[in-house]
Image (tube, coloured by chain):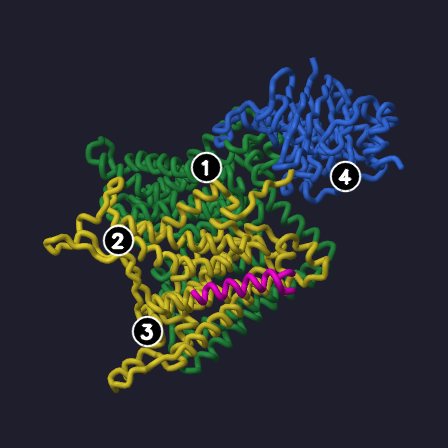
């Protein structure tokens, strides 16, 4: 059974159909790419999957459960977590605390215990801190664990977002333009991080990216969107030679 | 008289006074609309609730009072003239001077507040700016309490108002039965000429504002800045000047409203009396869709009507709570207001 | 830390807290005059109010400026229930205070739930206005209830000044918020403050977090209100006007929203403002007042210029220059004020403390906002580690200089 299934997912904002009947399956362990020109509806697709928007029609199933209309925090709970295109870290919290917020999702103690700081809560907080430190080391940010998130460089913020999403223990992790604004060296590091997430942590990855070289070298399956419609699906070599994709990116052939 | 009191859901409603109440509501609403325009324009450009706007209104009323005193209409002079049997008479020119002085002084006050209090907060969070606005509002209230005449609450003497004549429009005459008892009282609307003058002035001011915002360069700059500060400044618009201009414009309208309320209604003033009209006008701005100029006018009129209707159905003691109830309802049901658009935050 | 050690410190701190409260109560009521006792009690109440508002405003980021409403709900509900049941229930007044406090807390918590609902849909300044509006609506409703005395006021029995309980409440309130921030649960609240959408995407239940913040914050304010009601034994809606909300807000902002330590310090000092005229009966001449006001204006302007322009690496020298300029200006303002007093009108018109107390509040609020919008302590908390860090940093600074 597929991990995530989109079936004819559609959303309309007023008269605009931002995503129109998009369907694809993601299997467990996939490194799945979602590409398309600006305004193609990629981020909207992410917003549909993570519950920020509810699809106007169509279905989104995760592990066989329909997740349309679920609150975003419920969706995070059942195992889908994301990063944001326009970085949304908790600015005045430290990098470590940012990751701990992600890890907090799997807390077991009650909020009442939190107000009383029971021994169980102290123990759990220490555990979450340890887990967060571990994830910071995966994205090579151990040294800035106690810096404020808003003081970090752009590339570090992007990696911190990945660590934060990883901390929620997702089955599927959605990366929205993780390489945007990174220099080639940072991109190489990021590629290693993504492979590590998939291979060592056995997560499934769905990512949006504009850098074709990056996507082609990383993803095994790719869906191409244009004007909200799905125009192609396949492995990198198929996508590279698909005339529709070339047309979408370069305009009509002369 | 009992015959005309219709009982609706336990309330006694006297329909013969309804048209009069509606007109009263319109008059109050016009003043609210003038103040609401200031809130809406400032919010449109700065995304700031200018809490101190009500205090600008208060200062406008005091300015009108002081300028009437300067022109010789002090309580002393009036009683002296009355005793000497030469009552003071006023001309419309006096009112025009009072109006212009109130507008000018308020415009300057608005610009000063913006420069000293809000400009430094431009790059801070909106909450910080809001707290500053509360601070300015408190400061003006309590400074007013120290430096302005408040005890007993002064009001503009009606000698300065040449439009005191009352006109009455009979809608339906009284009906009597054979025994001569009134079975249906006369339904009429009675207003002073002053209030008609006031409504006309409000309409003129609003038309002038619409012209200014729609068809002049300054207005275009204002609208550009309200869409996007940064791009506007990149397009060569002096954003600081636009903001100052917006504050001056909004404050001048509040000053005009204050002068007219104080003159034609003869309202007694004290340093805190800007609070209630300020709050109500703010609600009016939100009701119409904050940032939206026609919305502010619509909201103001609706607020005025709502308030008088609440009094009419017999809940006058809850008059001041109505504004907040409307505010909460509108924010929960349609946060963008009646004419505004509901923007969704982009993820 | 081992379990037994945690429990040990915990038991010790609880015992110490209770001992402190009873000790303070015994000390102040035994030694000091009645009015000073009242001030100590008010300080405790305002610490509770500012810390509980900080939970809503500073920690969870829900901008509420109607805190006096919860205080009022607590005072009135506890009073109404007490008047109905106190005579028929078995407890003596001191023990009954705990019951009454809980009653106030429960009713205020319900009010907090109602006010918290709009926070699910509204943000920032809109929410602020709605909370203010709720406060006014509640006040106007009570004002029009003749059975509760309307604007005249409402007598509450028993009259009892539960000093130990007032301070115990303050300590519980501080401890609750501090505990929250020390646990991972607190991070959820902070995350909601920083970015709701991201918090929700990370699985934080934003709805629950906000509502809990409002309920807990309101409950503490309501408990404080109940104790205040019994202490005064005669309350009227004027005691809970917008000014009270603004005063508490100023405390939170002055201390640094998000900093519990800041709220405590600001609450324990600023509460004196409304009481000012009863403590000191000074008169200020018009000349001095004007000169001081203008002086403060210039001071703010000057310090802003310093902050913008004066990037002196030598920290000590900069501090000295800035401090010197500020002190000089302050002296100048007083001197000019005294000189102005020679002009008849400026010298003879005087204002007493009663008239200028809220003006001081407004000026304090404006000066903080214009000079340090994050408040005196920013997001910092008092801890021995923090003190050590600051001291070390200063030492390092001096060494490098």
In the image, which lettered chain appears green? C
Which label lies toward us, 1 or 3? 3
Magenta residues, as a range? B200-221
- Does residue B268 appear in the picture of this structure? no
Q: Can residue B216 be found in the magenta stretch?
A: yes
Q: Is residue C101 above or below residue B300?
A: above
Number of callouts in the render? Answer: 4
Determine whether the residue tagged by mark 2 lies in a helix, strand or loop: helix
Q: Is residue C17 left or right of residue B130?
A: left
Please rate how many residues cluster around mark 4, counting C-alpha atoms within 10 Å: few if below 14, some from 14 to 19, many from 20.
Answer: some
In the image, are marks 1 and 4 on the same chain? no
Chain name for mark 1: C
Q: How far from the left and from the top, in percent, is residue A165?
A: 67, 29
Q: Can residue A68 be found in the magenta stretch?
A: no
Q: Which residue is mark 2?
A: B16
Give the residue at x 42% y 76%: B67
Chain name for mark 3: B
Q: CA distance from mark 1 to mark 4?
A: 38 Å
């Amino acid at each position: 059974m597929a991990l995530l299934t989109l079936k004819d997912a559609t959303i309309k904002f007023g008269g605009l159909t931002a995503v129109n009947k998009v369907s694809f399956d993601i299997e467990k362990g996939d490194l799945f790419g979602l590409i398309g020109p600006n305004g193609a509806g990629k981020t909207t697709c992410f917003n549909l999957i993570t519950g920020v928007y509810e699809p106007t029609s169509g279905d989104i199933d995760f592990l066989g459960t329909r997740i349309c209309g679920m609150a975003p925090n419920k969706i995070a709970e059942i195992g889908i977590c994301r990063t944001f295109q326009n970085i949304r870290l908790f600015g005045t919290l430290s990098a470590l605390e940012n990751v701990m917020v992600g890890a907090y999702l799997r807390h077991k103690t009650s909020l009442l215990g939190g107000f009383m700081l029971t021994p169980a809560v102290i123990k759990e907080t220490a555990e979450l801190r340890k887990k967060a430190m571990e994830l910071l080391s995966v994205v090579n940010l151990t040294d800035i664990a106690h810096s404020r998130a808003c003081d970090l460089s752009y590339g570090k913020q992007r990696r911190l977002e990945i660590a934060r999403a990883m901390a929620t223990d997702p089955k599927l992790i959605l990366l929205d333009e993780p390489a945007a604004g990174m220099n080639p060296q940072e991109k190489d590091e990021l590629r290693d991080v993504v492979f590590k997430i998939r291979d060592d942590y056995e997560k499934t990855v769905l990512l949006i990216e504009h850098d074709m070289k990056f996507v082609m070298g990383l993803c095994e399956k790719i869906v191409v969107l244009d004007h909200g419609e799905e125009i192609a699906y396949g492995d990198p070599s198929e996508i590279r030679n698909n005339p529709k994709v070339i047309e979408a990116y370069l305009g009509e052939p002369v | 008289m009992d015959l005309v009191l219709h009982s609706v859901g336990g309330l006694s409603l006297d329909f013969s006074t309804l048209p009069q109440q509606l007109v009263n509501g319109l008059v109050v609403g016009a003043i609210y609309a003038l103040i609401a325009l200031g809130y809406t324009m400032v919010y449109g450009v700065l995304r700031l609730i200018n809490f101190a706007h009500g205090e600008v209104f208060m200062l406008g009323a005091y300015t009108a009072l002081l300028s009437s005193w300067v022109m010789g209409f002090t309580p002393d002079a009036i009683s002296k003239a009355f005793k000497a049997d030469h009552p003071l008479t006023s001309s419309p020119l006096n009112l025009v001077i009072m109006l212009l002085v109130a507008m000018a002084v308020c415009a300057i006050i608005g610009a000063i507040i913006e420069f000293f209090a809000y400009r430094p907060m431009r790059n801070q969070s909106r909450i910080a700016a809001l707290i500053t606005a509360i601070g300015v509002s408190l400061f003006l209230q309590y400074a007013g309490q120290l430096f302005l005449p408040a005890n007993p609450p002064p009001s503009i003497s009606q000698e300065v108002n040449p439009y005191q004549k009352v006109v009455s429009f009979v809608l339906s005459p009284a009906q009597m039965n054979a025994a001569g008892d009134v079975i249906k009282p006369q339904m009429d609307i009675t207003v002073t000429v002053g209030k008609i003058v006031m409504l006309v002035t409000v309409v003129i001011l609003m038309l002038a504002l619409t012209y200014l915002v729609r068809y002049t360069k300054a207005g275009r700059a204002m609208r550009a800045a309200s869409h996007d500060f940064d791009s506007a400044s990149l397009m060569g618009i002096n954003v600081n000047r636009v903001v100052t201009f917006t504050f001056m414009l909004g404050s001048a309208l509040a000053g005009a409203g204050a002068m007219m309320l104080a003159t034609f209604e003869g309202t007694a003033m004290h340093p805190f009396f800007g609070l209630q009209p300020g709050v109500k006008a703010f609600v009016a701005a939100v009701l119409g869709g904050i940032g939206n100029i026609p919305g502010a006018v619509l909201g103001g009129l609706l607020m005025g009507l709502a308030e008088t209707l609440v009094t009419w159905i017999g809940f006058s003691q809850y008059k001041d709570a109505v504004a907040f109830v409307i505010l909460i309802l509108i924010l929960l049901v349609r946060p963008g207001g009646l004419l505004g658009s509901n923007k969704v935050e982009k993820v | 830390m081992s379990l037994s050690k945690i429990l040990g410190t915990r038991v010790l701190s609880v015992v110490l807290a209770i001992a402190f409260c009873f000790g303070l109560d015994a000390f102040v009521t035994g030694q000091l005059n009645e009015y000073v006792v009242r001030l100590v009690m008010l300080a405790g109440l305002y610490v509770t109010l500012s810390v509980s508002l900080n939970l809503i405003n500073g920690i969870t980021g829900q901008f509420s400026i109607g805190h006096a409403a919860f205080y009022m709900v607590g005072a009135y509900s506890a009073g109404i229930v007490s008047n109905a049941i106190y005579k028929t229930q078995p407890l003596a007044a001191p023990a009954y205070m705990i019951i009454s406090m809980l009653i106030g807390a429960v009713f205020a918590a319900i009010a907090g739930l109602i006010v918290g609902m709009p926070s699910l849909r509204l943000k920032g300044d809109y929410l602020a206005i709605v909370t203010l509006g709720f406060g006014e609506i509640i006040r106007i409703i009570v004002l029009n209830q003749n059975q509760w005395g309307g604007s005249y006021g409402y007598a509450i029995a028993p009259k009892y000044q539960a000093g130990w309980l007032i301070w115990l409440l303050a300590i519980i309130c501080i401890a609750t918020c501090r505990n929250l921030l020390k646990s991972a649960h607190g991070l959820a609240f902070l995350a909601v403050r920083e970015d709701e959408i991201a918090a929700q995407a990370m699985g934080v239940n934003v709805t629950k977090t906000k509502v809990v913040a409002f309920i807990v914050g309101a409950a503490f304010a309501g408990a404080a209100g109940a104790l205040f009601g019994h202490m005064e034994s005669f309350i009227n809606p004027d005691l809970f006007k917008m000014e009270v909300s603004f005063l508490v807000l100023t405390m939170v902002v002055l201390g640094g929203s998000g900093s519990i330590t800041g709220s405590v310090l600001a609450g324990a000092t600023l509460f004196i403002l409304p009481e000012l005229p009863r403590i000191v009966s000074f008169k200020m001449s018009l000349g001095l007042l004007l000169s001081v006001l203008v002086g403060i204006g210039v001071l703010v302007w000057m310090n802003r210029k310093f902050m913008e322009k004066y990037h002196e690496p030598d920290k000590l020298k900069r501090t000295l220059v800035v401090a010197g300029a500020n002190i000089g200006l302050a002296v100048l303002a007083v001197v000019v004020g005294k000189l102005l007093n020679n002009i008849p009108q400026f010298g003879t018109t005087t204002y007493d403390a009663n008239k200028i107390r809220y003006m001081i509040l407004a000026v304090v609020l404006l000066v903080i906002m214009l000079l340090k919008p994050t408040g005196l302590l920013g997001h910092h908390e008092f801890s021995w580690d923090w003190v050590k860090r600051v001291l070390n940093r200063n030492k390092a600074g001096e060494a490098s200089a």
